[in-house]
Image (cartoon, helix red, strand yellow):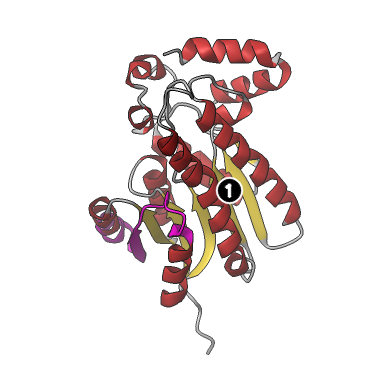
Amino acid sequence: MLETKMMYAMITGASKGIGKSMAIALARRKINLLLIARSADELSVLQSAIKNQYGVEVHILAIDLSHIEAPKAVLNWITANNYAINILINNAGYGLWGKFAELDLSAQLEMCQLNMTTVTSLCHLLLPILSTEKKAYILNVCSTAAYQAVPTLAIYSATKAFILSFTRALRFELKDGPVSVSCLSPGPVDTGFAHRAGLDAFNKMAEKFNMKPDDVAEIAIKGMFAGKSEIIPGFTNIISVYANRILPKGFIEKMAAGIYKT
């Protein structure tokens, strides 16, 4: 008898927020997991909880993906353990709020490394593995900020615009093969994103529009398996993205500057 290999979904930024919720959503579907994040403690807690509740295999790797050598270390971990992957979810990322000239340059470049280069590297390194499967998926987590320039979130929105464009182009290149490529663009979500970005003053207003990470994750996973190109959770976010496409850019930037003003 032929031995059936055990398949895994790999999620970066999996210890909290949308990444954690997507891990649980996949485990609920009896999909084994490779979870990656910086915090070994948080990953261990999540690993135990998922294994106990859903009975799936969960392996973890604690690593800072903002380091340039990290993607290759991830690949080495995968190949050394002979993990078979048919789902790659690039979720790790963060934002920094403030005027470009006033924010620390090294911190902004580190954000670029994580939000763009790490995603690009992981897609390139893991595509040979994903392409050997009968059906496989890449889900890159973007943001509604990708659809317009956002003053005081200038670099963050630019990194997400890169991910949106890259994902759509990659999807087209791979359309005749087994790998389906999708982009998830949530709006405000009830996670620690705003706090890390330095947007604590924005939290009260965001609460009116925040979605729960579990709801976003469920929409994301369903959209990924349905092969959607762009997944935008929430009616308000869909309307805002549509408005960004038809309204003058200067008007949109002025509105964004008013919302996120320092």
Q: Quadrant of residue 145?
A: top right
Q: In the rendering, at what x and y percent does residue 5 appear?
A: 49, 77
Q: Which residue is mark 1?
A: 224
User: Furthest-bottom residue in view?
Assistant: 1
Q: Who's the residue at 51% across and 32% down the image? A: 156
- Look at label 1 and name its amino acid: Met
Q: Residue at x 45, y 40 (%)?
A: 111
Which stretch appears magenta? 48-71
Image coords of residue 25 (percent x, y): 42, 49
Residue at 48% x, 13% y is 259
The answer to whether residue 258 is magenta is: no
Mark 1 secondary-structure assignment = helix
Pick the residue in front: 70 or 31: 70
For this rendering, which residue is in front, 169 or 71?
A: 71
Q: Is 195 rendered above or below residue 257?
A: below
Percent of width and height locating residue 239: 62, 20
Percent across and percent down for residue 10 are 46, 58
Magenta stretch: includes residue 63: yes
Seen at 48% across and 59% down, the residue is 71
